[in-house]
Amino acid sequence: MIKKRLNIRMSGLGGQGAVTAAHVMAMAANRDGKFSISNPFFGAEKRMAPAESYCRIGIERIYDRGELVFPDVIQVFHPQVITMGKSYTMPFYSGIKEGGVVIINSDVPLLSEEDVDRLKDLNVAVFYIPGTQIAIEIAGTELSTNMTMIGSVAGITKCVSMEALDGALQERFGKKFVASGGTASLDEAIKKKFAKKEMLLAKNLATVKRAYEIASEWGEKNKVELRIGNPAVAVS
Amino acid sequence: MAEIKSVIGTQNKKGQTYTDPWKLLHEAPRTPSFFTGSEVIKEAIRRASCDVMIAYPITPQSEAAALIGELFAEGYVGDYFRGESEFAVMSQCAGASFGGARVFTTTAGPGTMRAMENFPMWAGARLPIQMIVTCRGINSPLSIQPDTLEIAYLLNTGMLVWHAETAQDFFDWILKGYIVSEEPDVHLPLALCCDGFFVTHTKDVVNLTPTDMCLPPYDPYRSPVPCMDMECPPVRMMRDPFVMKSNYISYATHASWQQEIWAAVERSRKHTIHWLNGLIDTENTDADIVIVASGTAVSQGREAIRMLEDEGVRCGLVKVKALRPWPEEEIREATKNAKHIFVPEFNVTGWLAKEIRASIPNPHRVHAGPHVCGGMTMPPEIIVSEIKTALGMKTFSLAGRGS
């Protein structure tokens, strides 16, 4: 399916970097010459509480903002979004568009039979990726889980290039970044996990790449086609 | 007589060149940057020659307030400190402005409400303070999400009130706001509002002017009234307050001063039209259906108009930029052809629809809605659905979140 706009909803928990992931995706899309907007939605900032962010990428100017009610892609950053209902809605996939994709960070299946059937009816593909394990293996910290989420959505939809993601990561983590107190302390926490800032960038990029490869392979194998472009001139 | 020299063309201590405001905003080169709204507020203040910024944390303006603290550390803001509460902050802003400083502050939701007593005082004392209002829910149960109800409370304070749609509006209007509100025939505070999160926390492309160019500093001698000191004539507010004297003169003085504040709001009209290129923007207002909105509701309206076009329904748009001064004539003119006027709003009471109904002939044409409130998002699909329902067109039921 070729779409003028790809709407990505990232459902995570406070502290996982869902907000940062959406910002990095939008920054990368902007570098690729596409139109993009990202924004978060959360309550009082606290760890493990539901936190969502949204990234819209398209070929024409985007005005729409706020919570993404009708997404093409839903990413679940943490199993508790599903198992403990830490989502702004139940079920977590409500509003997903036909032909969409659900990406779940888990090494075991989490969906009930009913969920599987409902998503099947909507022709929604479900991709499980052990994102936290990959983050620990490659970057040495579960704090890089959000990098596997960035890599997996980029791998399946090709909505941003790896080159642009590299640039966006350097822009985000390569210089001093001032946000809220909570974000600043998380930035400090992740920097302490790496000996040098260059190491942080390199390992996070490697984590993105690994997830990109796994997701890309899965997308090809399962013939999941969700691309951004002009449907009027799209070649099937 | 000493020669009067203009500061234009000279440099401040950071090496920024004081630039003619019109040239700065209309002719200086622009660089596209991908920033959050909070970062854009910081970048505007970097170029605004602000003397004092006073901060108090409240979501969603805390990031912007913290970022301006960074600017102070870099030397771009004269003084910066945190007040004890929003009420204290707005009182301290008054003090700084009385002292002749260009003052900036930011607040949101319950903070705006807590500080409310100060706003008519600012207007009455003719202090051209600029306050960013990043709107959020104000009622209990608590919400930190966008809701524009607090703007309704600001409309009758005597402040100028503008409602930005995007971070680009913010960048330009912060700078233009100082120019308009510091005009001697205006000299009033400005509440520059946006919908929190949708602007402050959203990353979007914004075209910025060069960092080495800035506004000329505030000149307190352009104030049309002497500083209203607590103790000194001509207005000894504490020693000779009008309220203490129950006689005709005291009432008449107070009444005429209120009239003068609103006359000053009226006089800001010509400057606002000049600097904002009109109090409203219009698109395709020859259509039978017109959406009239302010803030983020304009953006959602633009998306709805695209969707309606795909279905062969033509719809015009009026973006209300200034709420005070109120663009009554402009809205009347822009809606004269409209059979249906839709007013989508991010609040429960529909204050914008009420203002519009009071301004136009045949006000039954106004459909107040759709409304979302308490921090809900307004998907363009619900605007489309509202319009199609009113036109008697078929709509499918929206399966949104929670269904």
Image (spheres, coloured by chain):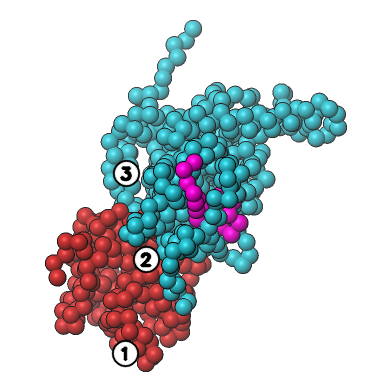
Mark 1 vs mark 2: in front: 2
- Marks 1 and 3 sit apart, C-alpha to C-alpha, by 46 Å
User: Which mark sits nearer the N-terminus, 1 or 2?
Assistant: 2
Q: Identify the image quadrant of the N terminus of chain A.
A: bottom left
Structural crowding at the residue carrying mark 1, measured as other residues with C-alpha within 10 Å and reported as few (<14), some (14–19) or many (≥20): few
Position of residue A69 relative to residue B354, above or below, is: below
For label 1, the SS is loop
Residue B207 image offset from top left, x and y in percent: 32, 44
Residue lying farthest to the bottom in this orientation: A113
What residue lies at 49% left-to-right and 41% top-to-bottom?
B336
- Badge 1 vs badge 3, beta-carbon distance below 8 Å: no
Q: Amino acid at mark 2?
A: Tyr
Q: Mark 3, residues whose alpha carbon is within 10 Å: few (<14), some, or many (≥20)?
A: some
Subunit under mark 3: B
Q: Which residues are magenta?
A: B336-353
Q: Colour of chain B?
A: cyan
Q: Is residue B7 visible?
A: yes
